[in-house]
Amino acid sequence: MRTRWFSAAVVLFLLVSVAGSALAQDTAPPPAPAGSTGIVITWPTPVTEVHGVIDVVGTVNEPDLVAYVLEAVALDEQMQVPENAAWLPMAGAQRQPVISGVLGTVDTTFLPDGLYAMRVAATVSDTTAGPSTYEYTVNPVRVSNINSPLSPAPSETPAIEPDVPPTPAPSPTPPPAPAVPYVVTAPGNGAVNVRRCDQVDNNACPVVGGLAPGVQAPINGLSSDGSGWYLVTTPAGLQGWVSPTVVNAIGDLSTVASVAPP
């Protein structure tokens, strides 16, 4: 009798063990989906305060990389990315992989002071499923240009920019002029200021935005007072004036209208 009871207990134990194993297999989480392992921003880090021109550092090393861009969006009162928010480009698209290096140089002065999320979005090609986009986001990042320790005091004299336009380098076979002429930062320059008028005067002609290196801005007009300054529209949608000493104009300017600065 004891042998039969022991045998029945063993059988019952085995049945419970098998059932428990099957239940555990049915309720285990599925494998994590394949994702990006080659995209990361290492600086700025969360809860970093930035101002002026900064280098965004990280890695974009995806197979079949098409291009990547750096973008920013203002956070809401809960320090979250608003639903359906429009991300603003902070620099031109790049196509070369970067490993633990500078992903792009960004002029934060075109962003109002506040808390932002910054991200790098990389597009890769896939012959089976079409292009895919991977993202890496850092937040919150505080932009603080007005209260920056590097902001000039009202009594400081701003740097004087020469009014003599640079001599263009000779080109034996110039490329065809674009349909709409544009400006791009001159080689060797960092981000440049976009001002309300065509003067280098922080009081009478304040800075309203900026152009990061390599970013193009269409030319909307030429200064009618002969200063040579260009009226442009930045990628952020801001309109202002840039000095010919810090940018190069590309395209046919003969059809560009003459505009009186404010």
Image (cartoon, grey):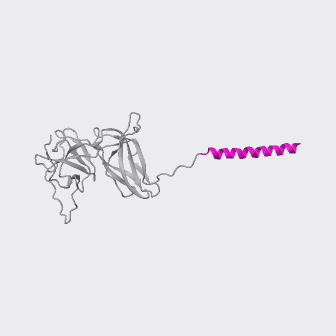
Counting from the top left corner in percent of width and height, residue 218 is at 23, 49
User: Could you tell me which quadrant the C terminus lies in?
Assistant: top left
Identify which residue is drawn at 82% across, 44% down.
Answer: 8
In the picture, measured across the screen, residue 176 lies left or right of residue 6, that is left
Counting from the top left corner in percent of width and height, residue 234 is at 26, 46
In the picture, measured across the screen, residue 166 lies left or right of residue 75, that is left
**In magenta stretch: residue 6:** yes
Counting from the top left corner in percent of width and height, residue 40 is at 42, 51
In front of the other: 132 or 249: 132
Q: In this view, does 35 lie above or below 86?
A: below
**In magenta stretch: residue 95:** no
Numbered circles on residues, count: 0
Identify which residue is drawn at 69% across, 44% down.
Answer: 20
Q: Is residue 200 above or below residue 128?
A: above
Identify which residue is drawn at 42% across, 48% down.
Answer: 136
In front of the other: 212 or 156: 212
Q: Residue furthest toward the top?
A: 77
Identify which residue is drawn at 76% across, 44% down.
Answer: 13
Type of secondary structure dominating the magenta stretch = helix
Magenta residues, start to end: 1-28
In front of the other: 39 or 223: 223
User: Could you tell me which quadrant the N terminus lies in?
Assistant: top right
Q: Residue furthest toward the bottom?
A: 172
Q: In this view, does 129 lie above or below 173?
A: above
Counting from the top left corner in percent of width and height, residue 158 is at 18, 44
Q: Residue furthest toward the left?
A: 225
Specify the quadrant of the image occupied by residue 144. Answer: top left
In the picture, measured across the screen, residue 248 lies left or right of residue 61, that is left
